Image: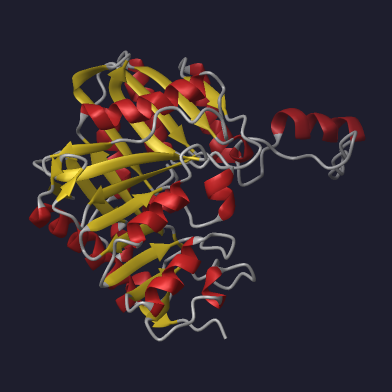
């Protein structure tokens, strides 16, 4: 962990199993242990039993817990209408096979998710599934902030990591903690919408503001209402020297690749590293990212990355002074349909909306995250879409 902005921003890069400095599971559990009054958790998937135990422990010490989850990681889609019945096993009647499928069996990859859900419900945790027909892709947790009131332990945890074993131990991810009431308030507004059942595209709400965290401008945006893709492009256009990124899914349906290509033609150096599985999809953006000023890479599953499952970052650094991170992959559905969040940290300017920018702190923050992207690139091979 590295602190920035007088301790208001804490950055974690993981997992340690892949050579990164931070144990993301411990970061998330420690954050949960710090809760005194309330936890509002919005996460796509929860299958890590140790994180789940920390949530249960919080509830049993009196913390009011609300949890929002993507239903696709809890439900089993059945085939046919009426559903196709299970095949009887040796010695089973068709009726016994159906009873087993309905009540006894859970041999799917979602078994742990549902075991955890049952434990949460038994402990009076308020759990809601999403109503978004697309992805509920959030990964954030609001601690001890409700009703516009910040307690001393109020904080916001967000980033690219789901609360899963793979995301905390086998996938490259980042987590950022904000100790700031203004940032907490932005996420409380999102929680209030989720409580009302407002998932996906809904009210635009207030125009996102820029907040001053000890000289670091911070802007929070939520998809789909705030169109984060436009904000990412806007920030990229401020770059004059280089753009580095590490991304899980980058589709040609996004306009971000077009902006990168235009900037490369104007002399900006672009370097990016992609997830090995996603980069080779027919819709992936690298097919169009062809220019002498653009270098693309894919991690090798050797050395420090021998146990890599996914490169799951959604991370960009512009001229070492702007960082864009969060849950947002570079795709049209992420921008137009999914529930997502991004945060923009820093600026290349001396002043932003009345905020006097601390260039040194912005640069330290940018260089810290740039170093992780470069570390991943060092363990990668060049990628050519040809």
Left/right of residue 143 with respect to residue 79 in the rendered view: left
Q: Is residue 87 above or below residue 149?
A: below
Q: Is residue 90 above or below residue 232?
A: above
Q: Is residue 64 above or below residue 271?
A: above
The answer to which of 46 and 6 lies nearer the viewer is: 6
Give the x, y percent position of residue 199: 56, 30
The answer to which of 358 and 240 lies nearer the viewer is: 240
Left/right of residue 325 with respect to residue 127 in the rendered view: left
Give the image quarter of residue 331: bottom right
Left/right of residue 15 with respect to residue 136 in the rendered view: left
Give the x, y percent position of residue 53: 38, 31
Give the image quarter of residue 322: bottom left
The answer to which of 361 and 208 lies nearer the viewer is: 208
The answer to which of 254 and 94 lies nearer the viewer is: 254
Q: Is residue 3 visible?
A: yes
Q: Residue at x 18, y 50 (%)?
A: 1
Q: Residue at x 59, y 50 (%)?
A: 333
The quarter in which the C terminus is drawn is bottom right
Q: Residue at x 87, y 44 (%)?
A: 87
């Amino acid at each position: 962990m590295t602190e920035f902005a007088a301790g208001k921003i804490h950055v974690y890069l993981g997992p340690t199993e892949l050579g990164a400095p931070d144990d993301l599971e411990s970061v998330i559990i420690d954050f949960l242990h710090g809760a005194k009054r309330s936890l509002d958790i919005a996460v796509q998937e929860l299958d890590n039993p140790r994180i789940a135990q920390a949530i249960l422990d919080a509830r049993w010490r009196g913390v009011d817990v609300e949890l929002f989850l993507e239903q696709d990681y809890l439900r089993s889609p059945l085939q046919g209408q009426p559903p196709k019945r299970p095949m009887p096993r040796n010695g089973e009647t068709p009726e016994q096979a159906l009873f087993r499928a309905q009540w006894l069996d859970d041999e799917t990859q979602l078994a742990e998710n549902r075991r955890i859900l049952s434990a949460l419900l038994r402990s009076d945790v308020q759990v809601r599934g999403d109503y978004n027909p697309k992805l509920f892709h959030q990964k954030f947790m609001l601690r001890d902030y409700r009703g516009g009131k910040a307690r001393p332990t109020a904080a916001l945890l967000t980033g690219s990591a789901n609360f899963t074993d793979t995301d905390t131990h086998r996938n490259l991810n980042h987590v950022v903690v904000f100790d700031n009431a203004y940032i907490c308030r932005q996420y409380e507004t999102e929680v209030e919408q989720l409580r009302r059942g407002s998932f996906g595209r809904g009210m635009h709400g207030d125009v996102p503001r820029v907040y001053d965290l000890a000289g670091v401008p911070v802007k929070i945006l939520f998809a789909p209402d705030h169109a984060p893709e436009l904000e990412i492009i806007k920030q990229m256009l401020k770059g004059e020297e280089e753009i580095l990124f590490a991304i899980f899914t980058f589709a040609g349906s996004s306009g971000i690749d077009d902006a990168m290509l235009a900037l490369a033609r104007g002399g900006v150096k672009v370097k990016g590293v992609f997830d090995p599985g996603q980069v080779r999809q027919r819709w992936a953006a690298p097919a169009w990212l062809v220019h002498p000023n653009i270098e693309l890479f894919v991690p090798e599953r050797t050395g420090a990355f021998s146990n890599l499952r996914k490169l799951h970052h959604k991370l960009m650094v512009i001229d070492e002074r702007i960082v864009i991170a969060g849950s947002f992959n570079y795709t049209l559905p992420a921008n137009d349909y999914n529930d997502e969040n991004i945060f923009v940290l820093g600026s290349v300017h001396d002043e932003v909306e009345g905020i006097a920018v601390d260039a040194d702190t912005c640069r330290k923050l940018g260089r810290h995250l740039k170093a992780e992207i470069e570390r991943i690139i060092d363990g990668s091979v060049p990628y050519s879409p040809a």
